[in-house]
Image (cartoon, rainbow, N blue to C red):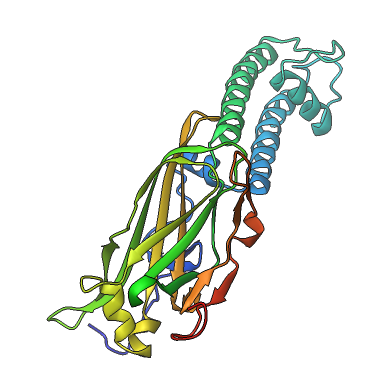
């Protein structure tokens, strides 16, 4: 092995999941062997740009076939690629204006093939557009910061508030909070261990407004150990919150994910009330206050 040979750095593919950035080496951003996944994961501008490129490429291909044999299409000027291109557009869309038409066996064969390709192309693009529009999207809102607050009896609790951004309620909602803990094995390799934090309530059969996820920082809590480990341990903290629910208006299951790093974890604070109830049947949820927090009262102070 030549130690002086230049080292080739393998380029990775970066992706952002909320506030967490990851990079994968050895994978491709776009795998042309999986066109369906590519078509449904592209953004709308990229999708329409790809659709337009395919449309122009198909018409240009058949235009070259028509232009290669002059006289195969009536009223197409010899050597005019533009006339052949626009005849291809009409044929691919199965729109016949009657001005240009195939007049030889070669022209009929090519136009028949193009008509079939146009039908398949239209069906595929219609299906892809429908899939992109019909995919259910979650409108679950997350507070910008998670808080560690002091509860009654001096207990400490992790709280993460979420809200239902739909007008109608969500059903059978379930939540999961996972803490990523950096760990070093016997060989000195560092990896992140995923540990689920036990929630006071991890499911909500009826989720119309807001829901505060609560984790008790008791003796069994790994989060309590991390917070007690000093600033260095706290800096390594990362929480992942996943919520799944059923949207009855869409008759589909929706899910959403939010990550919180150490900077998004506020100690000794609590959320400001965002829900008002008149004592009867009227409840108002101000989702604009979903992320509003205020510091806890100092121990021994009035209202603590």
Relative to 236, say whether 32 is above or below. above
Against 64, residue 6 (above or below) is: below
Is there any visible trace of residue 155 in the rendered image?
no
Point 29% across, 63% down: residue: 197
Q: Quadrant of residue 227?
A: bottom left
Front-lying residue, 93 or 263: 263
Q: In the displayed orientation, state which residue is furthest to the left.
A: 186
Left or right of 58? Residue 159 is left
Residue at (49% x, 51% y) in the render? 30
The x, y position of residue 152, in whole percent, is 37, 71
Percent of width and height locating residue 232: 35, 89
Q: Give 142 or 150, whichever is nearer the viewer.
A: 150
- Residue 161 x, y percent position in the rendering: 49, 59
Answer with the quarter of the image where residue 180 lies.
Answer: bottom left
Vertical relation: 169 (above or below) 292: above
Residue shown at 71%/36% (left/top)?
Answer: 56
State the image quarter where residue 83 is shown.
Answer: top right
Q: Is residue 251 left or right of residue 120?
A: left
Residue 194 in view: yes
């Amino acid at each position: 092995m030549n130690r002086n040979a230049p080292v080739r750095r393998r380029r990775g593919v970066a992706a952002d999941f909320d506030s967490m950035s990851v990079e994968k080496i050895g994978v491709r951003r776009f795998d042309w062997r999986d066109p369906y996944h590519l078509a449904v994961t592209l953004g709308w501008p990229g999708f329409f740009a790809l659709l337009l490129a395919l449309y122009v490429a198909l018409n240009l291909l058949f235009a070259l076939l028509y232009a290669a044999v002059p006289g195969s299409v009536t009223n197409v000027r010899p050597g005019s690629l533009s006339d052949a291109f626009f005849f291809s557009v009409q044929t691919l869309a199965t729109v016949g204006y009657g001005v240009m038409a195939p007049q030889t066996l070669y022209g009929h064969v090519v136009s028949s093939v193009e008509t079939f390709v146009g039908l398949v192309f239209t069906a595929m693009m219609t299906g892809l557009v429908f899939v992109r529009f019909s995919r259910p999207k979650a409108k679950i809102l997350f507070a910008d910061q998670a808080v560690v607050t002091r509860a009654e009896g001096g207990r400490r609790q992790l709280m993460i508030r979420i809200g239902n951004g739909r007008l109608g309620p969500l059903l059978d909602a379930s939540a999961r909070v996972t803490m990523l803990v950096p760990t070093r094995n016997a060989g000195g390799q560092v990896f992140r261990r995923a540990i689920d934090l036990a929630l006071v309530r991890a499911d909500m059969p009826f989720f119309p407004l807001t829901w505060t996820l609560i984790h008790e920082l008791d003796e069994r809590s790994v989060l309590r150990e991390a917070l007690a480990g000093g600033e260095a341990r706290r800096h390594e903290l990362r929480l992942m919150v996943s919520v799944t629910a059923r949207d009855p208006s869409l008759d589909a299951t929706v899910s959403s994910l939010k990550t919180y790093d150490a900077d998004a974890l506020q100690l000794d604070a609590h959320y400001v009330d965002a829900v008002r109830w008149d004592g009867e049947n009227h409840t108002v949820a101000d989702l604009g206050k979903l992320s509003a927090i205020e510091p806890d009262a100092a121990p021994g102070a009035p209202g603590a």
